[in-house]
Amino acid sequence: DAGVIQSPRHEVTEMGQEVTLRCKPISGHDYLFWYRQTMMRGLELLIYFNNNVPIDDSGMPEDRFSAKMPNASFSTLKIQPSEPRDSAVYFCASSHGSEVFYNSPLHFGNGTRLTVT
Amino acid sequence: AQSVTQLGSHVSVSEGALVLLRCNYSSSVPPYLFWYVQYPNQGLQLLLKYTSAATLVKGINGFEAEFKKSETSFHLTKPSAHMSDAAEYFCAVSKGGGSYIPTFGRGTSLIVHP
């Protein structure tokens, strides 16, 4: 099991540019989550999907952020246009549905560290 | 609404000393509780989880946590700290049964001195 795979590990971009973060969940997992981690706000849930369908995007900070999951093995988080305050570590996590309502842990990727200058 | 409070953003111990990381939860129904660990430049990993089967839960790397309903607490302990335990630790709570999505605490950074 390769775990949750995120790319790139680091991204440095200039303000106003489009940024796309990618995630491959663990095979067989049907829940996928996007989190943002900052010193100021801690770990924030941005959006989560179940069976490729967005269920709750109330954590997405504004319209500049969008997320898609075109199939069970791939998801993207896009920021357009990016701003310096978007600088953070973005984590993708996945989980298996049959455990979800009991004791399911989340399986996290190693994150993408985004720096917007 | 459910929430967790982790007391102390930083905890510093000497190698070999007892580790105690505090977590208090708020939940309207019996909760599911988790501790995760985050090593530098990595994602969070599950340390242990409580699901009502037993109040004392043993996890990986010698860590354990005790669920105390009367105190609404789920503190994490380890008898003897190792240098390799230095990391960020997160407590999380979920209600389960349809309200699965966990709520994470702000995290506690464990510093281990030689």
Image (cartoon, rainbow, N blue to C red):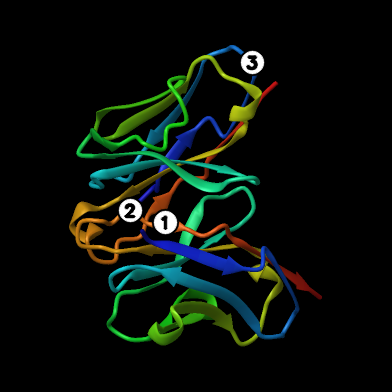
Asked if the residue at tag 1 contacts the one at tag 3, i.e. Cβ–Cβ closer than 8 Å, the answer is no
Q: Which amino acid lies under the numbered mark 2 shown in the image of this protein?
A: Ile
Give the Cα separation between the discs numbered 1 and 2.
7 Å
Above or below, A74 against A81 in this view is below
Q: Residue at label 3?
A: A15
* Farthest residue, direction right: B114
For this view, does A80 lie left or right of residue B80? left
Callout 3 secondary element: loop
Question: Callout 1, which amino acid?
Answer: Thr
Crowd class of label 1 (few under 14; some 14 to 19; many from 20; radius 10 Å)? many
Residue type of the residue flagged with mark 3: Met
Q: Which residue is mark 2?
A: B101
CB within 8 Å, label 1 to label 2: yes
Q: Quadrant of residue A40?
A: top right
Taking the spot 43% from the left edge, 40% from the top edge, the residue there is A5
Say above or below: A90 vs A86: below
Which quadrant is the C terminus of chain B positioned in?
Answer: bottom right
Position of residue A67 in the picture relative to residue A64 (left or right): left
- Which residue bears the numbered disc 1? B103
Lateral position of residue A7 relative to residue A38, left or right: left
Q: Quadrant where the N terminus of chain B lies?
A: bottom left
Residue located farthest toward the top when viewing the structure as drawn: A16
Q: Secondary structure at mark 2?
A: loop
Q: Is residue A103 above or below residue B80?
A: above
Residue A115: percent from left, percent from top:
65, 28
Name the chain letter of the residue that bears numbered label 3.
Answer: A
Please report the residue visible at 72 percent of the width from the left and 85 percent of the height from the top. Answer: B16
Q: Chain of mark 2?
A: B
Residue A66 percent location from the top left of the image:
39, 24
Label 1: chain letter: B
Q: Are the residues under marks 1 and 2 on the same chain?
A: yes
